[in-house]
Image (cartoon, helix red, strand yellow):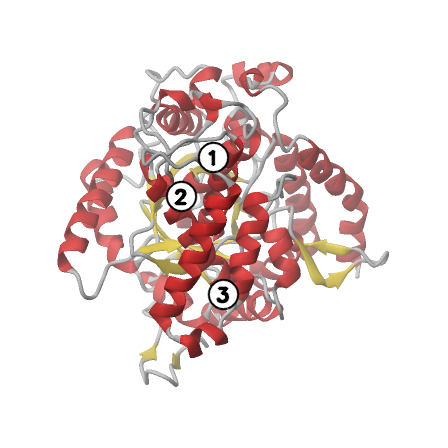
Amino acid sequence: ETCSSHLAVDRPQQLRLVHERLDHGQADAPSALDFLPETAAIRADDSWKVAPAPAALNDRRVEITGPTDRKMTINALNSGARVWLADFEDASAPTWENVVLGQLNLIDAYTRDIDFTDSKSGKSYALRPAGELATVVMRPRGWHLAERHLVDADGKQVPGALVDFGLYFFHNAQRLLDLGKGPYFYLPKTESHLEARLWNEIFVFAQDYVGIPQGTIRATVLIETITAAYEMEEILYELRDHASGLNAGRWDYLFSIVKNFRDGGEKFVLPDRNAVTMTAPFMRAYTELLVRTCHKRGAHAIGGMAAFIPSRRDAEVNKVAFEKVRADKDREANDGFDGSWVAHPDLVPIAMESFDKVLGDKPNQKDRLREDVHVEAADLIAIDSLDAKPTYTGLVNAVQVGIRYIEAWLRGLGAVAIFNLMEDAATAEISRSQIWQWINAGVEFENGEKATPELARKVAAEELANIREEIGDEAFAAGHWQQAHDLLLQVSLDEDYADFLTLPAYEQLKG
């Protein structure tokens, strides 16, 4: 009771922040984005650092990501990765069952009550010895998502972020300390240092409430919005007693750029998502600045996601993809990152090898200060420095991924393998945002067709027919295909751009 009433006191502040953020959902003048003048003194002050990393988070060279279902929990902990991002956010569809069972699975993992046999496959799953398990860093939902199954005294739905954080922290903080670890968190979709300040206040209260020392919590913040990229130092500063690092979250970052500059004209039009690699100049500026900022302040810099899912049938596809993953991880390790993400256990050894080559026996490379890096405000939004253009194939891919992902999400699945890539809500967001942006910018594709609502509807109808043919009438009827198709078109074609696809989708999510 005390806990919920205290958080209700903070609620007006949190709501004000969230409303402010929705109001500034689009930068008025994209070119005016800049490092904040009012916090210049924090950036100029070289004396402050974040708290030293606890032993369990000092070596983060490979992190695996995934939802908290029972099988994934065991496989991720056993994967050989140093860290598991246990995800209640983009890799999870927030049915009440997923929200609660995910928490129970983590409790069961810490008490080693999680072994089970899959009734369908007959395969047994069991945890390895404690010393071989990944350290858990849990990711709660973002501030924009409410939890409809819990309301406050005024009947308002409470923030999903606080439900996920609160349940996990309350049940596991002491248990984790007894295991030699601690309550560690990834904070998603942060847009400003004021949101980081709010999290810090929550951490201070929560640690007092359960009676554990201040600074026990550690938070790694995802820099996956364009506004946060201009406030990296301030975000670390606000959380300095609890901060352990920043992460470069690529797909949400691109989604945020499209969302903020969707009316910014031709120079802000992104090409196909697969053409925006981490070597694009504006992505390079963002990751280089992240490494420099983290290391200047004694924090870990964690790289982006390798989303490839190995094929059991196609060795040639695997070979090409593994080489791409290796090049990506080699680049990150050589740039100074202290670790990186993968979506599948088979990629752990590849990423591990890239970081082992650079780190050797050292737990991280925070001593590489990257003082050679100089990033200007304009570099972060120099989208037109890319040669690539949107293509018709890119439009088809965006529609395919969008429909297939949303359909699975409506069935309660948040991490979905589509065309050999592990997709989550961020990829659906970039898909629908690109469709929206290309239509609104009147993009003309290489085949002479123009991006229009009619073309998007035609491509979507064709994809729906292809899916029916691919899976058969019975499976098609049993799924949510028409609903997913309609929802994708709604959020891709509505003149009034929805801030998050998951908001209208949550209204249709059963359970």
Residue 263: image quadrant is top right
Q: Indicate which disc, 2 or 1, sits on the residue closer to the N terminus.
A: 2
Q: How far apart are marks 2 and 1 (CA)?
A: 9 Å
Mark seen at residue 438:
1
Q: Which amino acid does label 3 sit on?
A: Trp
Residue on which disc 3 sits: 481
Local crowd size for mark 2, using a 10 Å CA cut-off: few (<14), some (14–19), many (≥20) = many
- The image position of residue 308, as x and y in percent, is 29, 52
Query: Which of these two is toward me, 462 or 17?
Result: 462
Q: What residue type is labelled 2?
A: Leu
- The image position of residue 473, as x and y in percent, is 42, 76
Q: Indicate which disc, 1 or 3, sits on the residue closer to the N terminus.
A: 1
- The image position of residue 385, as x and y in percent, is 36, 20
Q: What element carries label 2?
A: helix
For the point 81% across and 54% down, which residue is it?
A: 5
Quarter holding the C terminus?
Answer: bottom right
Q: Are marks 2 and 1 in contact (CB under 8 Å)?
A: yes
Residue 320 located left or right of residue 82: left
Query: Which of these two is toward me, 132 or 387?
Result: 387
Residue on which disc 2 sits: 395
Local crowd size for mark 3, using a 10 Å CA cut-off: few (<14), some (14–19), many (≥20) = many
